[in-house]
Image (tube, helix red, strand yellow):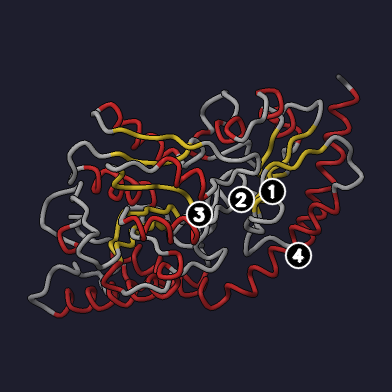
Amino acid sequence: MKKPVYLDYAATTPVDPAVAEHMMKFLTLEGVFGNPASRSHGYGWQAEAAVESARRQVADLIHADPREIVWTSGATESDNLAIKGVAELHDQPHIVTSIIEHKAVIDTCRRLEQQGVAVTWLEPDTEGRVSPAAVEAAVQENTVLVSLMMVNNELGSQSDIRCIGRYLRQRGILFHVDAAQAAGKVPVDVSELEVDLLSLSAHKVYGPKGVGALYVRRAPEVRIAAQIHGGGHERGMRSGTLPTHQIIGMGQAFELARVNLNAETDWLEQLRGQFLEGLESLSGVHFNGSREHRVPGIVNLSFDGVEAESLMLGLRHLAVSSGSACASATVEPSFVLRGIGLSDEMAHRALRFSFGRFTTEEEIAFATSQINEVVGRLRSVR
């Protein structure tokens, strides 16, 4: 049976073949398999050198110093480390975030609320963007951290992180940004954005699952408390034996993303245009998110008269999503779509289509023909 056309790159990306091939060199006896923390022999030295090379590759994509990169198991852990790590170091802290963040941020902030931490939940505009004015209005005297995503994982919308970062730096308030959906898709420069903490994930950038990083700006005022203890690895911020092969994979993936960023962005813009053009003849299609401030690879659409679950069943030759992969077990309408003002009915009719490096024009043409056919068929039997 032929595999469905994969249009769920926002959930995860396949590992780039060049990355997978490179990772294999760090697994077996013939390769560099040592523990990077074993500095008493050559096996450990080789592994440590490879890890530090990957650290530089990750840093280069976001224009950071390699010493500012802390390895984690993924963006979820990075979010937890950043938010809990800051809150733990303050008495009666106040945190600002939004109602459409990734669950890794929302659930972390809810947990802190249960422990007595004050949290202000910002509402986005109808395009899924959090305004600088909303952030300024929410800041209090005891605000220690603002946590916002750079690119929304369901909509692809981008908030004005640079403007928000400039204001918070002037106020001396730490700024955490989840950039899991931004890295490798749009330029990310931590100095220009004036962020203090930034979460990254390998598997969103054609690297392996199970590894990520947290950028921690090297400055006396940027301090976080470790959440995993046992050995003091990563300068005391995150203990645990480093998974060399995964880290090498993340480094290689981020290097490929840096080199190919402009060409890949152009390709995704072309695919996006083809996709939307292919649906122009279909009536009752509603675009969710921002048409201007967004990444090119994510398109979220609602279809009049068609439930998303029914549409996905009809689109059995396409792999698409009705929302975030981290919330796909629930039958509730997307909290992100409700957060931008959509009714439950319209939210239940929404699908997310996301394209990537290996998507072809032929696949886009096939996808739009399938959507046109299945939507038409489902509407005719109502």
Secondary structure of residue under mark 4: helix
Is 346 situated left or right of 356 in this image? Answer: right
Q: Earlier in the sequence, mark 1 or mark 4?
A: 4
User: Where does label 1 land, which residue?
Assistant: 299
- Could you tell me how far apart the alpha carbons at marks 3 and 1 are, in whole angstroms? 16 Å
**Mark 2 vs mark 4, CA separation in Å:** 16 Å
Of the residues shown, which amino acid type is indicated by label 1? Val
Near mark 1 (Cα within 10 A), the count class, few <14, some 14-19 or many ≥20, is many
The residue that label 4 is drawn on is: 270
Residue at mark 2 = 156
Q: Residue at x 76, y 65 (%)?
A: 270
Between marks 3 and 4 in the image, the one whose residue lies nearer the viewer: 3
Q: Quadrant of residue 194?
A: bottom left
Secondary structure under tag 2 reads loop
Q: Quadrant of the C terminus?
A: top right
- Name the quadrant containing residue 22: bottom left
